[in-house]
Amino acid sequence: MGSKPFLTRRKAFIAAGALGTTAALRRQGLISSAAAAGSELPPYIEIPHLQPFLADPNQIADIKVCIRPFRAAGPRLDVERIGDKTVFHNYGHGGSGWSLSWGSANIVIGKVATTLEKKVAVIGCGIIGLTSALTAQRAGCDVTIYTRDTLPHTRSVRANGSWTPDSRIALTKPAGPAFADLWEQMARFSWATYRGYLGLPGAPIDFSDHYVLSDKPMTTEDIEKKNAGKIGKGDYASTGMPQSSSEFAEYSDRITDIIPQAETIRSGEVPFGVAYGKRQQMMMYNFGAYGHLLLSEFFQAGGKIVNREFHSPEDLKSLPEKVVVNCPGYAAREWWNDKSLIPVRGQTTWLPPRPDLRYGMVYNGSSMLSKSDGIMIQGFDLELGEMAGVGNSFEHPDRSESERAIGVFTELFNRNAVKKG
Amino acid sequence: MIRKSSLLVAGLTFLLSGTAFARATLPPLTAEQADKGEALYGAACAICHGTAMRGNFQTPPLRGTFVARWANVPVSELSDYIQRAMPLMAPGTLSREDTIAITAWLLKANGVPVGKTPLPSDDKLLHSFKFPAIPAGSYKAVIPD
Ligand SMILES: Cc1cc2nc3c(=O)[nH]c(=O)nc-3n(C[C@H](O)[C@H](O)[C@H](O)COP(=O)(O)OP(=O)(O)OC[C@H]3O[C@@H](n4cnc5c(N)ncnc54)[C@H](O)[C@@H]3O)c2cc1C
């Protein structure tokens, strides 16, 4: 393989046919956009020998299904007046809720602060509610979280949990250029906040080497824009639903100055005997340690959690607080009757933890990431790209999807073992 | 430094009648002052506080929490602070007139309407106006995102 630096920043590389476009991978939260660019790994860096994991469906410990709360215009961050309550919305973060949480909370609580109200109610205890509550506490507010479920039971912990700040966060056109600026502000603020949580016991936030592997050369082509994941006629404007991957916004190019970039691995050194590969150092969230840490911080700062389910905006009347931060995620569709939320189904499969493995990879329609709470496997659809799961709110496990995703690694590991003799 | 105030209550009352703030208590400023301040902001302040005035992880925003920190404080204290401490890399370099213009821009950016009377440069006069809080519920009305 020629090992020239062959990528320009704006052009995604594709591994003809086999890998799908990196843009598609990135939008699904499988790699960051930086993997689409990048130079060659310098000679002084050696790729470590990677141990395989037992890739067998009989190792499945959990299958988690979640609905991404997607909105074409991006998350809802406006303010509404209901009776004597002022409601600051913070929901609809698509496949980027973990990544953007702190930045989004920073913007919303900035608005809350202007009211000079000290007592703040937060609805929801997913990653958006919890970071909003903590941000409000840090701004000097007394915060009560009203929620149906606490973090471990929320959709949030059924995510993948890596830095994917523009994974199905909006559609380019409906969101418009102003949202791109806001996104950048959120992404930068979140990234900086997360860096402050690195190096703590239990590694709530961590970095991991992420490998993008391919049997075919990764070439520069810009074809992804045109037809990837085109499922129907027209577009969002004409049908009310996205119809092709190319409608989804990509903003990651705006922050490559702070996000470690992907680098091409020298020929012959690619893990598991695969022909072509790239490596990127990626940030990830270990749900157990991180969730526990955030809840502890919230309680230590005097926060209270009230178990409660709201059924209509009228219910807000009974709250003692005048200021309400509304963070129900996808459930805003039911509880706030917000039909602008579009469900985007996603599924992750969990194998037992392997703390000795410190890597993740993407290969042939499947991705894995070794996290403190297990090896996470996520399959993705090479044909549908971004459109996979769009409009699908079937929140039940599909075991065959999990088995197929694991099978990709079974095949890879077996082939490599045979090759090595 | 979050204070509840009668201003807030007054603001809420006015909100019902369609006005974001209790006008009588608002500091005056002209469009010319604010425009000049905006240009100065772009040259001297935006490098740290950002073109959208949202700050960043290290630098405080000049909207949102900024209002909470300055609400009900005499405007003279804000302009004095700007003159003495800002810009951080060259404090004390802004003229009085430029400082007042930047103060006017900060007020406008945080929802204070422009009018015919300029923001006074005289410290005593300036002291009589308070930085306004944004009443709950009128955020959207006064600050575009
Ligand atoms: C498969 C998959 C992978 C993902 N991977 C990533 C990733 O790698 N990185 C990333 O950044 N993002 C990822 N996401 C996206 C991320 O998970 C979401 O954007 C995020 O979880 C949304 O969080 P939330 O707090 O808004 O919603 P939720 O987690 O749904 O929380 C909502 C909260 O509101 C409460 N609530 C709801 N309705 C009511 C009511 N009526 N009354 C009272 N309380 C109520 C709930 O109990 C809950 O506490 C992924 C999503 C999926 C599906």
Image: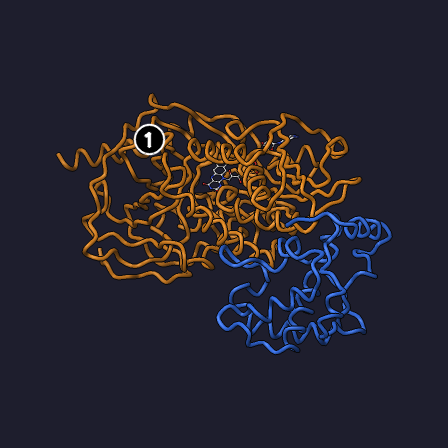
Chain colours: A orange, B blue
Is B41 or A415 nearer to us in this picture? B41
Q: Secondary structure at mark 1?
A: helix
The residue located at (65%, 52%) in the rendering is A237
Instruction: Give me the chain letter of mark 1.
Output: A
Residue at the far front: name it: B124
Is B2 or A35 nearer to us in this picture? B2
Q: Is residue B134 left or right of residue A55?
A: right
Residue at the far right: name it: B17
For ligand 1, give the image quadrant: top right
The x and y percentages for residue A388 are 50, 40
The residue located at (26%, 49%) in the rendering is A276
The x and y percentages for residue B51 are 57, 65
Q: Is residue A212 left or right of residue A115?
A: left
Is A217 or A344 nearer to us in this picture? A344
The x and y percentages for residue B98 are 63, 76
Amino acid of disc 1: Gly
Q: Residues within 10 Å of mark 1 (few under 14, many from 20)?
A: some
Q: Is residue A61 left or right of residue A136?
A: left
The x and y percentages for residue A376 are 38, 33
Is A215 or B33 nearer to us in this picture? B33
> Residue A145 occupies which quadrant of the picture?
top right
Is residue B68 something one can see in this rendering?
yes
Residue at the far left: name it: A421
Q: Name the quarter where the C terminus of chain B is drawn.
A: bottom right
- Residue tagged by mark 1? A407
* In the depicted structure, whether residue A15 falls above or below residue B128: above
